[in-house]
Amino acid sequence: MRLSGARDVAEFAIKSDLALNGFIEQLFHQIVKQQIMAYGPEVMDGLRHSFVESGYNIQKLVVQIATLAAVQDSEKNVIARKKT
């Protein structure tokens, strides 16, 4: 396989589940500073499905990741306060 430019790389990535998962994992880690699996196994499936359904809209994926992290952290804080 020969990749001659950014468009070839993008087309390859869209067709490859491994590349798509890798992109989402790396973006998640860059934004949240944690591994995606720390948020549960269903998170990757949900993000991948939403990303594909959005037509591979990276901006929407970033917003979804940030929202997910904020909600999860908020829930952890509520639980921690109830325990004290």
Image: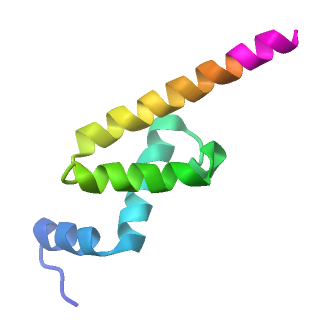
Q: Residue furthest bottom?
A: 1
Give yes or no for residue 81 being in the magenta stretch. yes
Looking at the image, which is closer to me, 41 or 24? Answer: 41
Judged left or right of residue 17, residue 6 is left
Residue 65 vertical placement versus 55 (above, below): above
Looking at the image, which is closer to me, 23 or 15? Answer: 15
Residue span colored magenta: 78-84
- Residue 76 in the image: state x and y as whole percent: 69, 23
Judged left or right of residue 61, residue 5 is left
Residue 10 vertical placement versus 2 (above, below): above
The kind of secondary structure the magenta stretch mainly shows is helix
Looking at the image, which is closer to me, 44 or 24? Answer: 44
Looking at the image, which is closer to me, 5 or 36? Answer: 36
Q: Give the residue at x 53% y 24%.
A: 71
- Residue 25 in the image: state x and y as whole percent: 47, 54
Give yes or no for residue 59 being in the magenta stretch. no
Q: Give the residue at x 45% y 37%.
A: 31
